[in-house]
Image: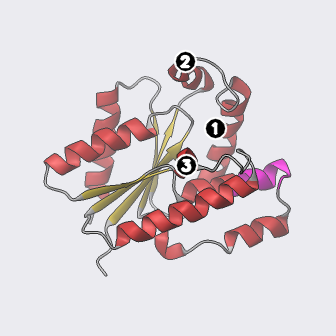
Amino acid sequence: MRKPFMVELTGTPEAGKTTSIECSCETLRSQGYQVSVSKESAESLPEDIPKGTPYANLWMHYRTQSSILKAQFSESDIVLIDRGLVDSNFYGKKFLWEGAYTEEEYKKFRTQFNEELMPNFLIALTVPPEVSIKRRGREGRLVNTEYVRKYNDEFLRYYDEIKIPKTIIDTAELTKEEMVSKILTVIRNNIP
């Protein structure tokens, strides 16, 4: 099986992940690459599974794994993943640090990982809380100053544990075009 180059984008809410993926996909296709996208699984979470819980994270994790597995059998050269397996593992760690998981529950969650499906490269996009809220248009249940501040702190703590090639891009002062250009440069510099 020919495995496509898989790039996961994760990071702060409203940092520009989905927008970057859409724009990068268009540019890469215009340059002759076969590109597929694994969409963020949170968008299709069933209503009866409570958001922000370990159960929701596990459901999204399985949904993401199936999407990535499907993409491996496609004719794609590049797969862009919107909040993939690195992201679901971060949330597992976050639940552990916040006391929603015990160490044993986190270890059990980690047994759900198929390491073959991990991306080749991770791009983490970040913005400070005030930028996240401004881009969202207002504070909400998840996108609020306290949540985004804590998310950023915990994500940076987790970032050091990630064992695959990775980079962080702060998108707060970037235009959409500058953000996409940086992402495309990272992809081009790392694709085999």
Residue 147 seen in this snapshot: yes
* Quadrant housing residue 52: top right
Please state the extent of the stretch shown in magenta in the rendering. 92-100
Amino acid of disc 2: Gly
CA gap, disc 1 and disc 2: 19 Å
Earlier in the chain: of badge 1 and badge 2, it is 2
Q: Is residue 178 left or right of residue 100?
A: left
Residue nearest the observer in this picture, 110 or 154: 110
Q: Which residue is mark 1?
A: 152
| Percent position of residue 139, x then y | 65, 21
Residue nearest the observer in this picture, 99 or 37: 37
| Percent position of residue 33, x then y | 19, 57
How many residues crowd around disc 3 within 10 Å: few (fewer than 14), some, or many (20 or more)?
few
Residue 161 seen in this snapshot: no
Q: Which residue is mark 3?
A: 44
Q: Which residue is pictured at 77% across the width and 65% down the height?
A: 106
Label 2 residue SS? loop
Which quadrant, please, contains the N terminus? Answer: bottom left
Q: Which residue is mark 2?
A: 137
